[in-house]
Amino acid sequence: MKQWARWCSAKLKKAAAALQGLAAPVLKSVAQPAVRVVEASARRALRRLEAMQADQMKALEGHAEVLMDKLHRTVSGQVAFTTGHAHLLGELQRAKAQKDSRLLPNLDLSERVRSIVRKHAGLPPVVTGDEGKNDLTTELRFLWDNSALVRQMLELCAGRRVLYSGQCYYNHWYLSRELRKLGWRADVLNWDPNPASQIYYHGEDFRYVGVPEEDLQMLRFFVQALYGYDVFHFSNAHGISFGSALASIVTPLFGERGEIYLLKELGKKVAYTNNGCLDGVSQTAFSRWGPDSVCAICRWRNEPAVCSDELNLRWGRFRNSVSDYQCLLGGNRVDFNDDPRVHESPWVYCLDPDMWKPGLDIPEPFRIERRSEKTLLLYHAIGNKQDRTTDEGVNIKSSHVYLPLLQKLRDEGWDLELLEPTGVPNKDVRFIQAQADIFLEMLTFGWFGANAREAMMLGKPVVCFIRPEWLDSLREELPDYADELPIVSATPETVESVLVDLMGDEGKRREIGRRSREFMLRWHSAPVAAAKFEEIYGRLIAGEPLLRKTAHGAGRTARLGD
């Protein structure tokens, strides 16, 4: 494998040398700066290939052929575009001086750029909306071949425009709605083909879920998005994508994940939201977190198609190679999460404070009648419960701990009712949550998720294990967040005493609920998140390398295991 990689690298260097030979006669007729741009693009492509790891050799083979073809065609076949590039940039600069697209993204210059690209690609300059596959793939090839030159033009069009590709529960939906209020073009693309997942989402602007009749529509959308957005924000492990339908069209053209590499070549900024233990972290590394290994009870521990060292690290390597800014919450800084571009970012996991608010009006079908005034309602829910629970009833949400404990407490005289909704759309499940007294969350994982955030926004107390090492790691970047976190931490060994204390003290529950609501409004409300991401995206568009800093101002050093 290593010998093959060296052979491929040698072939690429030979192609680069051939490129220099092709460029020599052009130097006499084309401005030096334009040629340097083309050569820089070739060098970037070469470096990217040389940096690829052994576990990507199969994808590399096809990608290498594509790039070698690009190196030859870029100079020899597109001289006319290169020669006129300076003039085109001048046109855009004059247009931008008249209408600043950073302030008025809806009056951007990207349509002008696209007409220029299509004209030099031999296509009709005016886009009608009914372009066919051959037309669009020709345009994509031209963008790929001339990415360094087109990039300079697109940077003049850059404005407040972000596309959220893929759902992140409802977080990106509410973030995008608030960004719109600040003047951003902020859209959500849902490409999830799984019908069962749709109950967790609250909205979308575009939906292409992989059915064959939508393939051409998705291709049209993607090509237009290359001109129409400046930040692309993805989420979830293996989710830096526009869906399988687009990948099936683009991979034969540019190799595996070519659509993402094209974004980078065109200067687009890539943000990413981390959503899981297997996201860039090996199972081996994660299993070492104590005091109780959550991997030991995980439904997926022996299913390498879902979670394995090789799969998780391969994803983390790719994720880090293309992301400019990554959002994480809760430490877990091992493997590819230990990178200065990975930030503690509570804001991205945001909620609409009016959607989840104390005193929510409960529709009749969701009202719960308590047996008596002493009845306590305990909420313990698991998304996709059947898939995430073993035949023995064990899962990372700690149901196997809570269920026998609650039966023991009932036997001791406590009047308890367990709320375990499943299959209820997320927009509706809040009506059940709003009636609960205490939320019961994970006792070994080490952090909290969507259920806990919803509970706290509703002003409810949450019991969940908070790993001290992760809290300390988070404190380095966001000390106030760590100090204000109101979750009541418990382990399987301490949860009984913690729960009994809360159940017996209504005043304590009310006070924790009050602090929980205040905490969420400060750190996880959609309006606050929009203000924060307006700053983050703006700095990314301006070209700032946003690297993680500790509370003391010192940057962290990445320790990647590759």
Image (spheres, grey):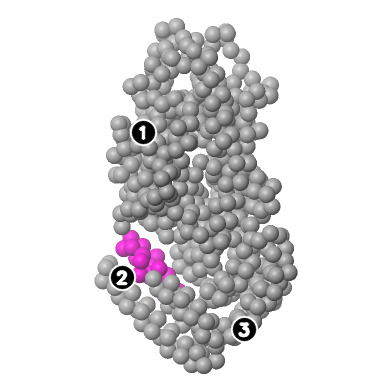
Q: x%, y% of residue 340?
A: 41, 53
Figure quadrant of residue 142? bottom right
Mark linked to residue 468: 1
Q: Which amino acid, by three-letter code, is at mark 2? A: Ala
Q: Nearer the viewer, residue 218 or 239?
A: 239
- Type of amino acid at the residue the image marks with label 3: Gly
Q: If the image is split into quadrants, where does the N terminus sit?
A: bottom left
Real-space Cα separation, disc 1 to disc 3, in angstroms: 60 Å
State the SS at label 2: helix
- Residue at screen point 54% across, 37% down: 523
Q: Does the image show residue 452? A: yes
How packed mark 3 is, by other alpha carbons closer than 10 Å (few <14, some 14-19, many 20 or more), is some
Residue sitting at x 48%, y 25%: 462
- The quadrant of the rendering that contains the C terminus is bottom left
Closer to the chain start, of discs 1 and 3, is 3
Which label was assigned to residue 5? 2
Q: What predominant SS class does the magenta segment belong to?
A: helix
Which numbered marker is on residue 84? 3
For marks 3 and 2 on the same chain, the one whose residue lies earlier in the sequence: 2
Q: Residue furthest left?
A: 3
Q: Amino acid at mark 1?
A: Pro
Q: CA distance from mark 3 to mark 2?
A: 38 Å
Quadrant housing residue 175: top right
The disc, 1 or 2, on the residue closer to the chain's N-terminal end is: 2
Residue 87 belongs to the span the image colors magenta: no
